[in-house]
Amino acid sequence: MSMITQGSNSDKILVVDDSPDNVFLIKTILEEEGYTVSTAENGISALAKIDEATFDLVLLDLMMPGMDGYEVTKRMRENKNLPFIPILLITAHDSPNVAQGLDLGADDFIRKPVTVDELLARVRSLLRLKHSIDERDEIARQREDFVSRLTHDLRTPLVAAERMLTLLSEGALGSLSAPMQEVITIMGRSNTNLLAMVNTLLEVYRFEAGRKTLAFQPIDLGQLLKEVAGELTPLAEAKQLVLLLDFDEESCKITVIGDRLELHRLFTNLIGNAIKFTDQGSVTISLVPFIAVLAQMRYILKVEMIYL
């Protein structure tokens, strides 16, 4: 009698085999260990059950009439809506090499006739893998949820602080001495930078979580850059920098397909950083042709920092 720890009742296993005797044997072994076992007699039935219910492990006979184990494995791994489910291939000693099944995404194999110890050892091993991946995914989900909540919570006080600092700077709450005005200006700039970082973090989260939808449309790149440059000119003038456009908007008509808001954000960040880290001289914005696939011309923004 094998001295083996009992399995968890929460672990659900699907056994797929066209042989009733094999199904009965494996089902009996697994149920004695406390696992919840479902069965399917062919590949089509197995895929239907996998779509209808969740399983922690699939024991899959490799050679079955109609849809064999190779095809079932392939379809399971191609289904992006399925969570990760380990696949244990069951194959006869005289069957073809199982390497193809492993290449298609199966995780392990066992040969018939199965022994109790080996079967349970491989089942426990794959269930540990399943639990480990599920735990990792849950931690990642919780982390993403935390980042989302934290980012939203951070934005509220920062936006309020920015508004109050603007009112103070404009003298809405009374005149300020020169030293106080300087301090308020520095505080406002720091708060604006922090708010920009929080907004960037939120945008990155939205992209990674698939919650960001891009609105693609034709965009005049030169016009967009001119617009961004106009918005950032006061920032450059405050540092006594000259902001230059190194292209003729009329003669250099460049249209790209993209999300205007995101491109505006990208260019604002790039040019804003150039201004931020340039202490004297000028900041020049130029368009550089970039060769892309499919015989299309794409362009990237090049920001040059010139020190005099």
Image: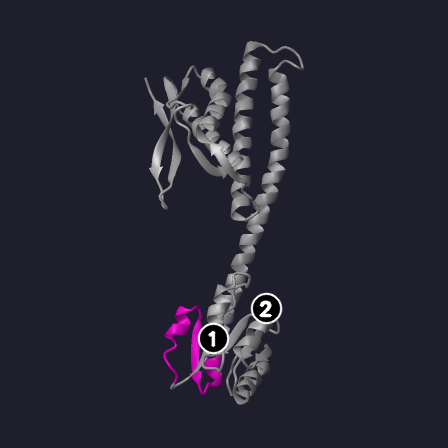
Image: 95 above or below 296: below
Name the spot of residue 293 as percent of width and height, x first: 36, 45
Picture residue at 50% right of the left edge, 68% below the top: 76
Residue 100 counted in the magenta span: yes
Residue 276 counted in the magenta span: no
Q: Which residues are magenta?
A: 95-120
Picture residue at 51% right of the left edge, 66% below the top: 130
Identify residue type, mark 1: Leu
Q: Residue beneath label 2, please?
A: 51
Name the mark on residue 294.
Answer: none
Q: Residue furthest left?
A: 308
Name the spot of residue 71 as percent of width and height, x first: 46, 73
Direction from residue 38 to residue 271 in the image, left or right: left
Q: Residues within 10 Å of mark 1 (few under 14, many from 20)?
A: many
> Camera-side residue: 165 or 45?
45
Picture residue at 51% right of the left edge, 42% below the top: 204
Ranked by sequence position, the earlier of labels 2 and 1 is 2
Name the spot of residue 250 as percent of width and height, x first: 42, 23
Direction from residue 149 to residue 285 in the image, left or right: left
Identify residue type, mark 2: Asp
Residue 286 seen: yes
Q: Rounded to the nearest whole Å, what is the CA distance between mark 2 and mark 1?
A: 18 Å
Q: Residue beneath label 1, please?
A: 88
